[in-house]
Amino acid sequence: MHQRTRILVTGGAGFIGRHLCTRLVAEGHDVLCLDNFFTGTKDNIAHLLNEPHFELMRHDVTFPLYVEVDQIYNLACPASPVHYQSDPVQTTKTSVHGAINMLGLAKRTNARILQASTSEVYGDPKIHPQPEPYTGNVNPIGPRSCYDEGKRCAETLFFDYKRQHDLKIRVARIFNTYGPNMHPNDGRVVSNFIVQALKGDPITIYGDGSQTRSFCYVDDLVDGLIRLMNANESVTGPINLGNPGEFTIKELAELVIAETGAKSHLTFHELPQDDPLQRCPDITQARQTLSWAPTVPLAEGLKKTVAYFRDHVAG
Ligand code: NAD
Ligand code: UDP
């Protein structure tokens, strides 16, 4: 009998989780999606609810969980600055207590466990592009710290569980990812700009728009996560997953306006505190150890994302 891999995806009803669950179900695995619906929605995984090998569980990762699984993708954590700053204590608890609980589960079940870490561990980087050995430039007491330091502490826990208990860990440092099914009120730049453009509202640029980000299409990212999870035992990461194409926020706004044909004009607002000025992944390690590199250029990914938002929020 074909043994299905039992896979737990925490934060599975969120943006990336939705795409990961969809792909894992399509590959024939037994998927348990866990979410407390803080930023995720049931609509995101509604298309999977009738699948016999998909299961949805409402649960908060800051509380222990007892299930039997072979692999754990730990994605639970709000990713948009607007949302993670709205309850910063809960954000740190989600990253830290959540990591402890999921690592405890992995220890008991002997499961492989992958942490969705972030380029935010590099803070406002002084080295560009960012390679994995760079230890970062993070403010421990600012408004972004609940997320950045929470994720850094989660990485510490992952590597201590490996050293102390020989756990099978993987740590992915994810750079800005976008695509269909981002929440329209998510607050992140790609969804904000597309929704504003489709409504003909002004495009809100924070600062002068010269800060840079590197945008990875969600299908590419999911492919990287799955490759990392299934790479040979010696691969732990941390490993950068992102698209090295680097754009200023102003360039992004212009691309969105061109793609939507919007009449929107740009408005300039104060740059939030500690907003990183530049960000671009060095993906040499991902290329070498996972044979992975993104395949979807920004213009093409934006086309697909705009099409999604046109169908779902326009009007
Ligand atoms: P998202 O906000 O859409 O999804 C996060 C999911 O986690 C949501 O469904 C939310 O309800 C759930 N969640 C939050 N707190 C929880 C808790 N305590 N218990 C259970 N569920 C909880 O964000 P996303 O973009 O899908 O990000 C997924 C993961 O990837 C996050 O860990 C994020 O930090 C990481 N990441 C994302 C990006 C990106 O650009 N999207 C970049 C770097 C890292
Ligand atoms: N940003 C912006 N307008 C918006 C939302 C975001 O100019 O409506 C900027 C933000 O200040 C940052 C970049 O876009 O410099 C990316 O922001 P996002 O919240 O998507 O992610 P971050 O990489 O900062 O976590």
Image: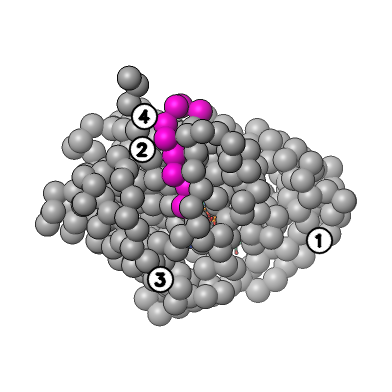
Mark 2 CB lies closer than 8 A to ligand 1: no
Query: Secondary structure under badge 1?
Result: loop
**Foreground residue, 73 or 187?**
73
**Foreground residue, 230 or 289?**
230
Estimate the x, y position of residue 42 in percent, counting from the top left.
61, 51
In space, the residues marked 2 and 3 are separated at their CA atoms by 28 Å
Label 1: which residue? 202
Rendered image quadrant of residue 150: bottom left
N-terminal label among 1 and 4: 4
Label 2: which residue? 6
Is the residue under label 4 in contact with that under label 2 (CB below 8 Å)? yes
Label 3: which residue? 92
Q: Residue furthest bottom?
A: 141
Does the segment drawn in magenta span residue 251?
A: no
Report crowding for label 4: few under 14, some 14 to 19, many 20 or more residues within 10 A (C-alpha). few
Estimate the x, y position of residue 54 in percent, counting from the top left.
49, 38
**Type of the residue with mark 1:** Pro
Is the residue under label 1 in contact with that under label 3 (CB below 8 Å)? no
In space, the residues marked 1 and 4 are separated at their CA atoms by 49 Å
Residue 10 visible here? yes
Residue 209 visible here? no
In space, the residues marked 1 and 2 are separated at their CA atoms by 46 Å
Q: Is residue 270 left or right of residue 120?
A: right
In the image, which residues are magenta? 26-34
Label 4: which residue? 4
- Residue 187 vertical position relative to residue 259 in the rendered view, above or below: below
N-terminal label among 1 and 2: 2
Estimate the x, y position of residue 91 in percent, counting from the top left.
45, 69
Q: Is residue 93 left or right of residue 200?
A: left
Is the residue under label 3 in contact with that under label 2 (CB below 8 Å)? no
